[in-house]
């Protein structure tokens, strides 16, 4: 299982995508070392939510990255739950390949607000 997260247009975007490819390659190579055959591999893709209005479409880009990578590696996607606006909690049983998604409530209660401190004209958090 990998968790791939990229942000929107940044100067280091190319390097970030390289980390995603590296993580996926490490996962596949680990499976191959354990005796897996590429033809037998199947994937399930989860996530890619846009949880904060107007922030970015990075969730969609993350899901698209994973789909494109799997297509290039000729690994079939057999299950998918992507997009939307809510966070997910994923439970996965590697022995059977079973996965379960639980949606997390959208609102997160604020226990207390912390006021930023200002020292010498610099705002500290």
Image (cartoon, grey):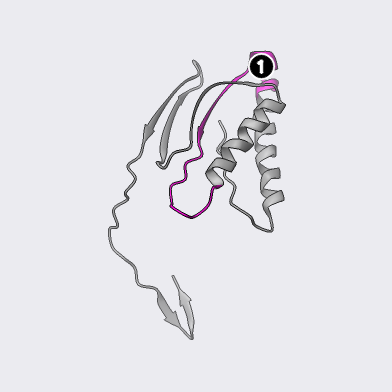
Q: Is residue 35 magenta?
A: yes
Q: Is residue 123 magenta?
A: no
Task: Estimate the x, y position of residue 96 in percent, counting from the top left.
Answer: 49, 15
Task: Estimate the x, y position of residue 97 in percent, counting from the top left.
Answer: 50, 18
Query: In this view of the protein, which residue sits in the foreground, 115 or 49?
Result: 49
Query: In this view of the protein, which residue sits in the foreground, 3 or 78?
Result: 78
76 over 91 or under it: above or below: above
58 over 71 or under it: above or below: below
| Residue at point 34%, 68% (across, down) | 114
Task: Estimate the x, y position of residue 52 in percent, counting from the top left.
Answer: 43, 51
Magenta segment, which residues? 31-57
**Would you name the residue on which mark 1 appears?**
36
Identify the image quadrant of the N terminus: top right
| Residue at point 43%, 52% (across, down) | 53
| Residue at point 71%, 44% (across, down) | 18
**Residue placed furthest toward the bottom:** 120
Does residue 4 appear in this view?
no
For this view, does 3 lie left or right of residue 99? Answer: right
**Residue placed furthest toward the front:** 54
Task: Estimate the x, y position of residue 12 in percent, counting from the top left.
Answer: 69, 55
Q: How many marks are shown on the rendered structure?
A: 1
| Residue at point 64%, 13% (across, down) | 40
12 over 79 or under it: above or below: below
- How crowded pointer 1 is (Cα within 10 Å; few <14, some 14-19, many 20+) is rated as few
**SS at mark 1 in the image:** loop
For this view, does 33 lie left or right of residue 61? Answer: right
Does residue 88 appear in this view?
yes
Identify the image quadrant of the C terminus: bottom left
For this view, does 13 lie left or right of residue 2? Answer: right
């Amino acid at each position: 299982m990998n968790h791939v997260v990229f942000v929107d247009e940044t100067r280091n975007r190319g390097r970030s995508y390289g980390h995603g490819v590296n993580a996926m390659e490490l996962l596949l190579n680990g499976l191959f070392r354990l005796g897996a055959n590429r033809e037998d591999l199947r994937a399930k893709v989860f996530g890619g939510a846009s949880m904060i209005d107007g922030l970015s479409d990075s969730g969609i880009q993350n899901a698209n990255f994973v789909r494109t990578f799997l297509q290039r590696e000729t690994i079939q996607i057999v299950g998918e739950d992507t997009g939307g606006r809510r966070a997910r909690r994923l439970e996965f049983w590697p022995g059977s390949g079973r996965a379960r998604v639980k949606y997390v409530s959208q609102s997160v209660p604020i226990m207390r607000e912390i006021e930023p401190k200002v020292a010498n004209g610099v705002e500290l958090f």
